[in-house]
Image (cartoon, helix red, strand yellow):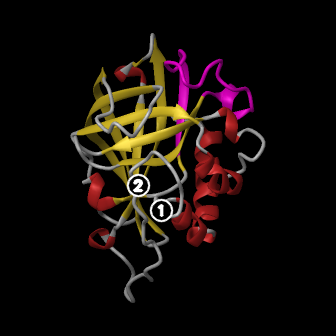
Amino acid sequence: MMSMTRTLLLTAMLGSLFACKDEASMLANPADEDNDFDMETVDDTAPPEADGPNREDADLASLQGVLTVVDGNIIAEQSRLEITLFASELELCTADVWVVSVEPSVVDDPNVTASSWWTLSLAQGDTTAALNCDAPVPATLGLGAAPYDAQLASAADSAGFEDDGGALYSALAQFGAGEPVYLFGVLGTDAQFDGMPAGDPSAQIEDGTYTLSTLYLLPLSDVQ
């Protein structure tokens, strides 16, 4: 089960994200920053529909969860993800995502350097929402950990990580071979969230239980 503390922190973090979304878009724009990641600016400023958004209006998504790593690999049966859909600033629904299998792999973008990279096979679990909508789950997900990237600093500060953000790993996602690699969040153990950095963040990720948190929402067009 996902840590309640981290879940509550993610909820508060998303509120801060929307309050600072103009700055978040700027930081995620590769044209504005000299960075190694192929990222895209997300337009999350569209107002909701007059009658209230529904599943068809969803345009953004977040990924969060808990991952157990042993000998550098994610243990599927001890890991769980969630995907949450958003229409502009309104949360629509959250679905459990089952991690069916995991293969250690290498990111296919030569401009991206990751400490660890995995290909996850996924399946949708239970959906819970006030609205009746199904969250799309990609069949496979490229997920990576990299040394903390300063581009996350503003969003990490808004999320309350200002004292320990640098101790965390950057979280990377890719929704298919040859697709953009997104720098979208952070990954860390409880000790890292408390400010204790990994021994060598550029080396293979250490054994432990890691919480994945989204700082910048992902474009749903790439997730589904």
In screen coordinates, is 109 left or right of 72?
A: left
Residue drawn at x 66%, y 56% as measured from the top left:
154
Mark 1 or mark 2: name the one nearer the start of the chain: 1
Instruction: Identify whether 46 is placed above or below 123.
Output: below
Residue drawn at x 61%, y 27% as measured from the top left:
189
Res. 55 image quadrant: bottom left
In the foreground, 178 or 161: 178
In the foreground, 204 or 213: 204
Q: Which residue is mark 1?
A: 29
Q: Position of residue 203 (x, y in %)?
A: 53, 19
Highlighted magenta segment, given as a residue range? 189-213
Magenta segment, principal secondary structure?
Answer: loop
- The kind of residue tagged 2 is Met
In the foreground, 99 or 134: 99
Q: Position of residue 213 (x, y in %)?
A: 53, 44
Q: Which residue is mark 2?
A: 39
Residue drawn at x 65%, y 18% as measured from the top left:
199
Q: Tag 2's secondary structure?
A: loop
Mark 1 in CB contact with mark 2 (< 8 angstroms): yes
